[in-house]
């Protein structure tokens, strides 16, 4: 998941490099020796897969920045940190701007997001929710054995 503009630029550059590598593999321009067709096909498929992954990440970040997404589905508590990051991006806030709202340094927000808020206290996560102006609605479901 791309979390900031720097990562976006790096991902975009990586996609370009992989596309150039794919061109070289498919044209055979980088080879002085023949490559077995199966090996070449495996290289092509691997490059296609990596390029597709990068393009999906770029598209998700672009969509978050440009579309007015008003809700993010959270299927489990483990999904909550990524939803916070997506909400920050969709709100048009940089990590620096969120840090300023919270009275923190930008590096602290970068650390929180890099670890998906693993080191953040519950009260800090609540502050982030308030700073982003989010309304969190989720139900807590007991295991089926306790519902009977």
Image (cartoon, rainbow, N blue to C red):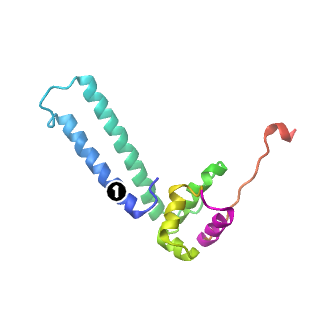
Q: Residue, x 36% and y 53% (percent of image)?
A: 11
Seen in the image, is 42 located left or right of residue 122?
Answer: left
Q: Nearer the viewer, residue 45 or 69?
A: 45
Which quadrant would residue 20 be assigned to in this image?
top left
Note whether residue 140 is visible. Answer: yes
Note whether residue 93 is visible. Answer: no
Residue 45, position in %: x, y? 33, 33
Asked if residue 133 is positioned above or below residue 76 in the image, the reply reads below
Query: In the image as oriented, which residue stretches furthest toward the right?
Result: 148
Asked if residue 103 is positioned above or below residue 77 in the image, the reply reads below
Seen in the image, is 144 located left or right of residue 19?
Answer: right
Seen in the image, is 100 located left or right of residue 12?
Answer: right
Q: Is residue 125 in the magenta section?
A: yes
Residue 34, position in %: x, y? 15, 25
Residue 99, position in %: x, y? 53, 72
Residue bounds of the magenta highlight: 119-132
Which residue is labeled 1 in the image?
10
Q: Residue, x 58% and y 58% (percent of image)?
A: 117
Q: Nearer the viewer, residue 131 or 110?
A: 110
């Amino acid at each position: 998941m791309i979390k900031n503009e720097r990562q976006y630029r790096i991902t975009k550059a990586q996609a370009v490099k992989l596309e150039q590598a794919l061109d070289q593999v498919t044209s055979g321009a980088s080879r002085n020796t023949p490559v077995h067709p199966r090996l070449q096909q495996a290289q092509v498929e691997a490059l296609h897969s990596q390029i597709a992954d990068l393009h999906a990440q770029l598209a998700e970040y672009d969509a978050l920045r440009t579309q007015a997404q008003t809700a993010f589905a959270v299927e489990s508590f483990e999904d909550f940190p990524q939803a916070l990051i997506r909400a920050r991006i969709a709100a048009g806030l940089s990590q620096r701007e969120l840090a300023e709202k919270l009275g923190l340094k930008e590096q602290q927000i970068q650390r929180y997001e890099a670890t998906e808020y693993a080191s953040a206290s519950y009260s800090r996560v609540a502050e982030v929710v308030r700073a982003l102006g989010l309304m969190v609605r989720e139900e807590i479901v007991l295991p089926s054995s306790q519902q009977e």
